[in-house]
Image (cartoon, rainbow, N blue to C red):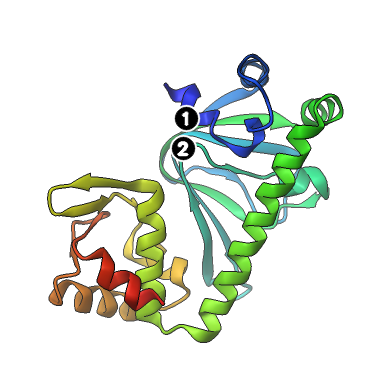
Amino acid sequence: MEDDIALSAPLFAGLDGDAAATLVATMKPIELTRGDVLFHEGEPGDRLYVVREGKIKLGRRSSDGRENLLAVLGPGEMFGELSLFDPGPRTATATVVADAVVLELGHSELVQWLQERPAVAQQLLQALARRLRRTNEALADLVFSDVPGRVAKALLDLSTRFGEQVDEGIRVAHDLTQEELAQLVGASRETVNKALADFAARGWVRREGRAVVLLDVDRLERRAR
């Protein structure tokens, strides 16, 4: 079951079942606990990772110590592929948000697969294009959307990957602290908490520690526009 989830990553999309299973078998599983750092921003990178279990956050830190959360990734998602196409320093720090298992693939192994199976390269390029599109959308949101709108959009995005249908709506176990959620939307913790409190008062969400239940998705979608 775990490998079935991992096989949903773009890395395997261009492979048949046997070839994908063979590639998974060559990848090294790494077990991690919350708070572990897989790699730091600025370090040389020559590894690609696929999340099998848990959650990983990708963040950048400014010279004055402030941190911006670029993404939160879960099972079936991959990261680190940029360094394989454009060798150089890591552009973000990868930190474990919830106990995780990731599959690691080195540069030489991946290059061999790309040479033998061009369809894999096409899938990886499509994944990079999707990531660039999301980055452009995030930049536009910072310019054109207010904080409550960005919070609503972040909750909806997290729900598509980590949400579970419950009687009252969609429960999203995001595993993020209040500070990490604020970093994800590019705002202060106080401002994000104010937005969440307002959503809760309106009956749109219910907060449950490091989880939130989306009670009125339609209203959140309208607020996110």
Tell which residue pokes out farthest to the right in this image: 115
The amino acid on which the numbered mark 2 sits, given as a three-letter code, is Pro
- Residue at (64% x, 21% y) in the render: 20
Judged from the image, the secondary structure of the residue bearing numbered disc 2 is loop
- In the rendered image, residue 43, in percent from the top left (x then y), is placed at 72, 50
Give the residue at mark 1: 5
- Residue at (63% x, 51% y) in the render: 40
Vertical side of 47 occupied by 201: above or below: below
Depth check: 4 or 64 in front? Answer: 4
Vertical side of 1 occupied by 217: above or below: below
Give the residue at mark 2: 75
- In the rendered image, residue 204, in percent from the top left (x then y), is placed at 19, 69
- Residue at (45% x, 71% y) in the render: 185
Circles 1 and 2: CB atoms closer than 8 Å: yes
Vertical side of 198 occupied by 95: above or below: above
The quadrant of the image that shows the N terminus is: top left
